[in-house]
Image: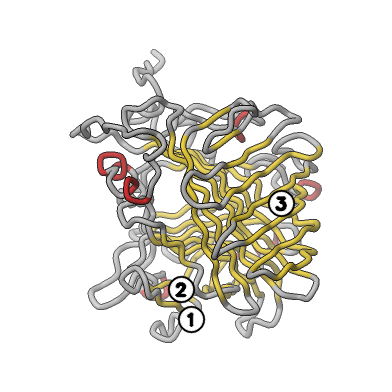
Amino acid sequence: MDQPVNNNSSPWEWPVIAPGPSWSVPRISLPSCLGPLLQYQQEWWYYAGYAKDSAGNSYSLQFSINRFPIVDADPLLQIIACITGIGDAATNTYHLNTAYGLGISTDPELIMGLTIPTVSNELYDISTSPAVGTAKTRVQLTGGYAGVAGSTYQLDSSATGKDAYAASLQLSDERGMVLEWQSGYIGPSPSDQFSASSFEFAQPRLSITGGSLTLQGVSNTIIGGMIWLDRQVLTFPKKTDTPEAVSLPPLSTILTPEHLGKLGPVLQQMKPLYTGSWMGINLNNGVSVVLACFWQAPPEGKLQWQTGTLLGLPPTATYGNVYFPLESDPRRMPNGGSYLKGIESGDPEPYIFDFDVNIFDPDHPDTSPHWQSSILGKATYATAWQIRMGSQWQVYGLPDTLYLKALVSGCENVLPSKELPFSGYWEGAAAIFGDEALTQEIGHAFVEQMGFN
């Protein structure tokens, strides 16, 4: 049989070659996948999770490094976003800090918006330098091999001014890098709600072994917690109407807030990723789970957060994985967990599923825990969930139902301009319980809600 000819000059082209569940985009490997993959339009290094201090308080943590290109510009001319969100459970407050830089450098002596020397087994050092805002983040490999179980890292992030903070965390990788879904490739959903060609992989269990967090001028000793590194690269379909080339002003002015709002042709390409929810789950028994649901539009008079199978509104598409501890992996899948499928609209047998995400109290949807924004058109987000797991997974240490409750209710990221991609979305940590009364804590999760009204 003749082999298919790849006429695509790069993964930027659309459609991808051999679309399907496996290897629809070029393969990646450690340790290079931790470095920038510039053949993709967008990518991010997304360190998210929770921490506990010596006084028993909990924090929701998000340290995100994102990049996206300027149309028709040099591939290295990238806009870099450093987004930090810290939720304080004791005060139920959320502190968001955003900063922007320009360009990528692999030379440690040439500091750009994103500086990341060529990654090797024993070198991983990613750092941001702001041109607008003051937030900056750096993650360095301090021991072992990059992306491999047993490796250790130092994460430092800080900002000055009104929203000053400083985080210094020591991380230890319990699981190593894993692939999401069947091969790491997550393509467009049948409903086109997720229209990008995406490759996703993760370090799901970066245990916090120590550190400090200074917030509102108060320094706290961090004694535990867990960070999930979500590493993602993606490319959108090419538009039939090619945007006009952007006329770039001097680099010293390109990242002013005023100019960011005027990059129309660029920002039109950077549409919100999807309408749905993503959850990175770490149980205390060493099992990790990633789940994603792409939600259908709610009926008239209802809000997007009030969705779920138990409300008669199953998602249009789902994906997920379960990852076991390396030393006791019953499925023997060291770099990719057993993949999961949730209930989806149109399923012929809707009661056969691996997982099913619903709001916490679907019987009383108006009073199920939620939070309403006062900024972006009063967008509303769920703050508690129940996740039914298929019966086959109880054999491997998962309860039949997981109950999640956000540590901090108002973890909304609102970026400076409504024209920017993902200008409003919810990102926060949640405690996981094995009982509906929320008394038996069995782990923690990090939850993303995007595209909600």
Residue type at numbered disc 2: Ala
Q: Which residue is mark 1?
A: 369
Q: Is residue 90 above or below residue 96?
A: below
x and y percentages locating residue 164 in the rendered image: 60, 62
Q: Is residue 343 visible?
A: no
Tell me, for residue 382, which label it has, or none.
2
Depth order, front residue of 35/113: 113
x and y percentages locating residue 34 in the rendered image: 61, 35
CA–CA distance in space, label 3 to label 1: 29 Å
Side of 363 where 332 appears, left or right: right
The structure residue drawn at horizontal position 59% and vertical position 64%, both measured from the top left corner, is 86
Residue type at numbered disc 1: Pro
Residue type at numbered disc 3: Leu
Depth order, front residue of 104/438: 104
Q: In what element is the residue under mark 2? A: strand
Circle 2/circle 3 CB separation < 8 Å: no
State the colouring used for the structure image.
Answer: secondary structure
Q: Which residue is mark 3?
A: 206
CA–CA distance in space, label 1 to label 2: 6 Å
Circle 1/circle 2 CB separation < 8 Å: yes
Q: Residue 69 lies in what quarter of the image? A: top left
Q: Is residue 135 visible?
A: yes
The structure residue drawn at horizontal position 57% and vertical position 48%, both measured from the top left corner, is 230
Side of 435 where 14 appears, left or right: left
Q: In what element is the residue under mark 1? A: loop
x and y percentages locating residue 208 in the rendered image: 75, 56
Q: Is residue 315 above or below residue 28?
A: below
